[in-house]
Image: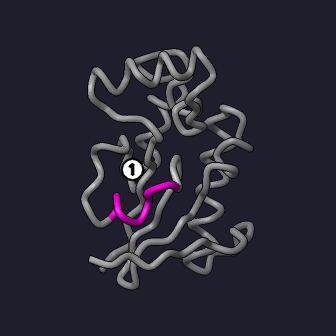
Amino acid sequence: MQRQFFAIYNADGSLSGEIRYLIGKLSGASECALCDLSHGWNPFGREVWRQSKEALSQLVWLHRDEQPDALRAFSEGLLPAVIMEEASGFKILMDAACLKACAGDFKLFEQEFLARVGALIGDSMASAGPNQTREVDE
């Protein structure tokens, strides 16, 4: 199995989900560092994200309610996150704290993502540090 990478928002993709997230964000009850990276306050996405996401074509962007069942079971309570799937299962590549540390800077996110992927495939890029893993019963 070839590795797959998923960027999963801590928000639902339906219209009602988007409205709930917006209300939560305005009231301070909801946050999603991945949403801040890709969209900020722009419902169509930040320009830098729209221009750069093609360069990260190996990264599949999903809302919480768009995940396949196995991925949803793994990611429950861990969102937002960037998750890698390989033959041995799912692993957290970038957790919510890592995404928040990017402070809405998509270029910093892109750099960190590529460094972590590089570290996984033995590239000489910066070390990714420990990955969080979790077993999922199917």
Q: Amino acid at mark 1?
A: Ser
- In the image, residue 129 above or below residue 44: below
Q: Name the spot of residue 20 as percent of width and height, x first.
A: 41, 22
Q: Name the spot of residue 125 as percent of width and height, x first.
A: 70, 68
Q: Residues in magenta?
A: 71-77
- In the image, residue 105 above or below residue 119: above
* Front-lying residue, 25 or 106: 25
Residue annotated with mark 1? 57
Horizontal arrangement in the rendering, residue 67 relative to residue 76 (left or right)? left
Q: Is residue 39 magenta?
A: no
- In the image, residue 28 above or below residue 116: above
Q: Residue furthest bottom?
A: 88
* Front-lying residue, 46 or 130: 130
Residue at x 25% of width, y 58% of height: 68
Q: Is residue 76 magenta?
A: yes
Quadrant in which the C terminus appears: bottom left
Residue at x 46% of width, y 45% of height: 55
* Front-lying residue, 38 or 131: 131
Color scheme of the displayed model:
one colour
Q: Name the spot of residue 110 as percent of width and height, x first.
A: 60, 47
